[in-house]
Image: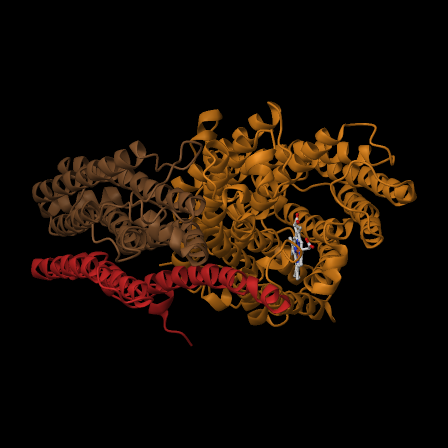
Chain colours: A red, B orange, C brown
Amino acid sequence: MHNLQDRFHPGSAQEHFDPMSHVVPIRMYVTIWAALMIFTGLTVFAATVELHVFNIVLALLIATIKGTLVALFFMHLRYSTKLTMVTVIAAIFFLFILFGLSMTDYLTRAWLTNTIH
Amino acid sequence: MATAVQSVERENYLNSNYGIKSWLLTSDHKRIAMLYLISITAMFWIGGFFAMLIRLELLTPAGDLVSSDTYNKLFTMHGIIMVFFFLIPSVPAVIGNFVIPLMIGAKDLAFPRINLLSWYIYMAGAITAIVAMVTGGVDTGWTFYTPFSTTYSNTHVIGAAIGIFIAGFSSIFTGLNFIVTIHRMRAPGMTWRRLPLFCWSNYAAALIMVLGTPVVAITLLLVALERAFNIGVFNPQLGGDPLLFQHLFWFYSHPAVYIMILPGMGVISEIIACFSRKRVFGYEFVALASIAIAVLGFLVWAHHMFVAGISVYAALVFSLLSYLVAIPSAVKVFNWTATLYKGSIRYETPMLYAFGFIGLFTVGGLTGVFLASLGIDVHVTDTYFVVAHFHYVMVGGMVMAYMAGLHFWWPKISGRMYPEAWAKLSALLVFVGFNTTFFPQFILGYMGSPRRYHAYPPEFQVLNVLSTAGASILAVGYVLPMIYFLWSLRYGELAPPNPWNAVGLEWMTPSPPPTHNFDETPIVTWEAYDYEHQPQEEVSVGH
Amino acid sequence: MATSDIQVAEHALQHHFADMEQQQETSTFGMWMFLLTEIMFFGGLFCAYLVYRASYYQAFVEGSQKMNIWLGATNTAVLICSSLSMALGVRAAQMGKPKLMAILLLITMVFGFGFLGIKGIEYHEHWVHHEFPGPNFHFETGDPAHPATDPQHTQIYFSLYWAMTGLHAFHMIIGIGLVLWIMIAGLMGAFTPSYFTPVENVGLYWHFVDLVWIYLFPLLYLISKKHGG
Ligand code: HEM
Ligand SMILES: [Cu+2]
């Protein structure tokens, strides 16, 4: 049998409610801010170096690191429920389906014509 | 509580206060459901009016009743209204809105005011679209294909696109509300495994609403911008790729066809269980099949573009993926059938509609699989075969389910019974009329009759006349319920709380329910569809 | 303080929730759900960007070289600063300091307007150089040795540039309105340490808009190194 406690708040599990529990120290916010600024400088600098395809890879990598920092700390994702995490992951997952399956068309459209000519 | 004596004076959501303001400013999910019911019914008749004109034109091979331009506008406006303003909100916004909170033992949806806002947004979208139609109409087809829609059509494309754009946000907010509600508002003991399948399937449809609708919204916005400023994104003359439009459009619109079937499947699960007095066979599989359909539905969109010029390799991938969607759909059909097996079946109106649904959805779904195979699709794409396919799933499936649900929950909604004999007659008329209308179209399409033309070769006339005749029967089948539902509001027998002897929390509160749904928050201690252990009178009350 | 705290909290509890915990988690989850729809909304444009950039890389490089990297980088920094002040504002609300919160939100708005101002300068530059898609679009690299190779597709680059940054700017404007609203509500005593969900949610929205820009900046401004700016 399930325990009765569980039933009263399905979904919220047993986490205890305390809105004050996630007060993040100012130092943390400032550190994240500084990291974001440094990464911004870095990405501008990286763009001036010729790395061929790796320019875009690096740019997106840096953007993703910055984005992750914003989400985890400024948006408190790090302290939020699993459900919130899943929501974010779902968004990214379906976004990649949109990108990926669209590209199956664009990347292979020329194949057939190439073999014919 | 379930045995409470019916009294006319008892306060309920309908008589708790009066006046137009108490309806237009309500945040009660039940009243909002009624606002939707009225508005989408109006849209249904407008869309139906266009359909009648289409069928009349097709009575004769010559294009005599309307010009080809007018005909183009007729099928476009029929499609836009029926898809975006009737079918998408039908089961979720009316029935879902009304019963989901009741089913899970909640007082309301998670965000009641956003729920009301959704309705206003819907109305704003509907009025925008109707204004565009009245002031000249649109002729692009409901799919708005570029570059016709962006460059060549000289009808009110922008107005119609903006109308749909706006209505999209209504759908997004409804979906968001359902997801959050089902996660967060369940009564104690209402675990995921006890959740009615209607909630599961609406949850799955809501996932599609929140994930897909934004994409079509931005796409239609781009169409409007392209038309207004010639920005080139979808215009091949300016270097754009019209197929990109189709990708973005179908990324939403294929999953959207599952918005237009999943909630209906939920209705059918409830009804089949109730009227065969059995737990739905393989409850978990039926529940998970909804989620599987929603997710897989996002992987198949380019099966609408097989002959549009996409890469053959991509077409192969999409064709294979499309077959996969048929699996969870089939799981549902098999499990409903298995539920019927050895059930003590009662043939009441909702059940008649449910039977109709199972048969017609099966035909529609299987022909979908035909269309998903490249070789067949090249032959029948853009013919009446496709038209028949999607009407079997959308009208034979979803509209049937909507009618089934309206009859099933009408006693709860209105507090009155509808006249059973008339209802059975109408269910029969709908079934016969529907098949007479659309089955000939499979044959027409297979013989090569293309869709979207106002004239056709004389040898196709017999089948077309049959189709138009069927449409008239279908129309009678839809008018009847409209009349007797209205009639029943005044003259119908008073409904007991649980006229069908069904399980489910919505039947444990009076009909019509009080504003706050339950006098005390119910605590669920039994499994879903616990028909084997009926009667199950008690609702244990919270402490 | 403590009693008024409870009063505000009681007042803020809507009838259909069992308690504040359920209400607070529900609305935060709702906000994240909304952000998911926003991701998909921008996602359509990002998809178009991906498709065209993959197909017409050179045209995109040439368009991107018209971007003023320094203004773009400055604006990125401005937004990051605004995110910091926003985060600190939420923190102040969390700790029950409405005045401090108001000041921090005011700073956030100032950064927001700063961003829009700089964006406006850039827009103006593009406009006078006919870098707005449509009949008046006219594109030259400005380097006679390397004339534009594919102006047609560079126009698509600019279409996407205007659409993406325009949609982003539109979100900024909404965001500033929301921040103003919670600032006023906060000063009127609407929030307490046990009830500040609207502040939290507006914060989420603001950070999200910042996050979108974090991707827009490299994708639109930094396509090729050939111009440091
Ligand atoms: C069992 C799974 C299904 C499969 C494999 C499937 C497959 C297809 C395919 C391949 C097409 C494109 C035909 C063509 O244009 O050549 C199509 C069209 C269509 N299907 Fe389905 N389908 C399925 C279920 C559904 C359902 C459940 C609905 C709606 C409730 C639906 C609604 C439509 C509509 C509206 C179109 C036509 C769109 C247009 O061009 O106007 N389908 N289907
Ligand atoms: Cu499809």
x then y, percent, for residue B157:
56, 33
Query: Which residue is outermost to the top?
Result: B135
The image quarter in which residue B528 lies? bottom right
The front one of B435 and B285 is B435
Q: Is residue A75 left or right of residue A27?
A: right
Query: Which residue is outermost to the bottom?
Result: A1
x then y, percent, for residue B201:
55, 58
> Which quarter of the image is occupied by the C terminus of chain B?
bottom left
- The residue drawn where x is 58% and y is 65% is B314
x then y, percent, for residue B318:
60, 64
* B465 w.r.t. B206: above or below: above
Q: Is residue C173 left or right of residue B96?
A: left
Q: Is residue B486 left or right of residue C78?
A: right
x then y, percent, for residue B215:
47, 49
Query: Which residue is outermost to the front?
Result: C145
* C52 w.r.t. B487: above or below: below
Viewer can see residue B514? no
Quadrant of the rendered image holding ligand 2? bottom right
- The residue drawn where x is 35% and y is 63% is A83
Count the numbered circles shown. Answer: 0
The image quarter in which residue B41 lies? top right
The front one of B339 and A38 is A38
The front one of C90 and C119 is C119
Viewer can see residue B241? yes
The front one of B168 and B351 is B168
* B199 w.r.t. C185: above or below: below
